[in-house]
Amino acid sequence: MHRLFHFPLSPFCRKVRLSLAEKRIEVELVEERYWEQDADFLRRNPAGKVPVLRMGGQNLSESSAICEYLEELHPETPLLPRSPEGRYEVRRLVGWFDDKFFREVTSKLLYERVNKKVMGQGYPDSANVKAGARAIKFHLDYMAWLLDQRRWLAGDSMSLADFAAAAHLSCLDYISDVDWNRSETVKDWYAKIKSRPAFRSILADQVPGFLPPPHYADLDF
């Protein structure tokens, strides 16, 4: 059995979990308190970050590298288009969410509200929380603009770009930090994503001390 060392509210771990589930690759989930920098975990990934996928005798790290490895190993359920232009657009948007969205939104909301408490690092910085709440509006509007032109974020087919975006938004939705009324287009897109079988284990996640809102696991919101 493959093993994924993860943290439930890590968007990078969720992106890998979605890719694994979509490709029907069974994996044992091992929750890792990576911030404690355990010696065994650091041997698996000296960078001290999750996710780490133990597969085929290898310890695979870095979420995008893992997802592309899975794509090459199991291309029969494609999450990257065939054309170079299509693959570029998917990779561009994965980078957008894992870099820009993470810096401007996820790190300001999720990490302040949840991770600080879990890791024993003090109280949320209200300035960061306010900045994240402002920034997410821009990102939701950008997603709405993309979806007004395309069926999915990167084109006509669901791709890794959709999973990257959904991974971040699902973490924020767990703490009620997404205004789904801002865009019906984005809300409909997310409803389609979270209705997929690949999303089931994510909607079942529970973090001690933090209860998700009632709509979190409701496929119809």
Image: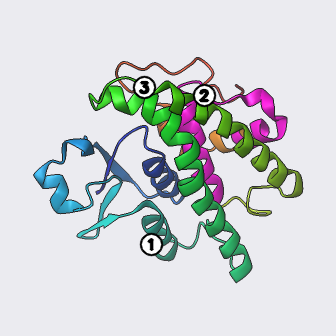
> What segment is highlighted magenta in the picture?
161-190
Q: Residue at x 59, y 35 (%)?
A: 132
What's the residue type where badge 3 is placed?
A: Pro
Q: Residues at badges 3 and 2 in contact (C-beta under 8 Å)? A: no
**Percent position (x, y) of residue 167?**
55, 46
Judging by the rendered image, the residue that carries numbered circle 1 is: 69
What's the residue type where badge 1 is placed?
A: Tyr
Q: Residues at badges 1 and 2 in contact (C-beta under 8 Å)? A: no
Q: Residues within 10 Å of mark 1 (few under 14, many from 20)?
A: few
Disc 1 or 2, which lies upstream in sequence?
A: 1
Judging by the rendered image, the residue that carries numbered circle 2 is: 177
Q: Residues at badges 1 and 3 in contact (C-beta under 8 Å)? A: no
Judging by the rendered image, the residue that carries numbered circle 3 is: 124
Closer to us: 8 or 204: 8
Magenta stretch: includes residue 188: yes
Q: Residue at x 77, y 41 (%)?
A: 186
Figure quadrant of the N terminus: bottom left
**Percent position (x, y) of residue 79?**
61, 65
Q: In the structure shown, which secondary structural element does the residue marked by tag 1 occupy?
A: helix
In the rendered image, the residue lying farthest to the left is 39
Q: Main secondary structure of the magenta part?
A: helix
- Mark nearest the camera among 1 and 2 is 2
What's the residue type where badge 2 is placed?
A: Asp
Disc 3 or 2, which lies upstream in sequence?
A: 3
In the picture shown, does residue 67 fall above or below 171? below
State the CA–CA distance, disc 1 to disc 2: 32 Å
Disc 1 or 3, which lies upstream in sequence?
A: 1
- Mark nearest the camera among 1 and 3 is 3
State the CA–CA distance, disc 3 to disc 2: 14 Å
Judge whether residue 71 can be spotted in this image: yes
**Percent position (x, y) of residue 220?**
72, 27
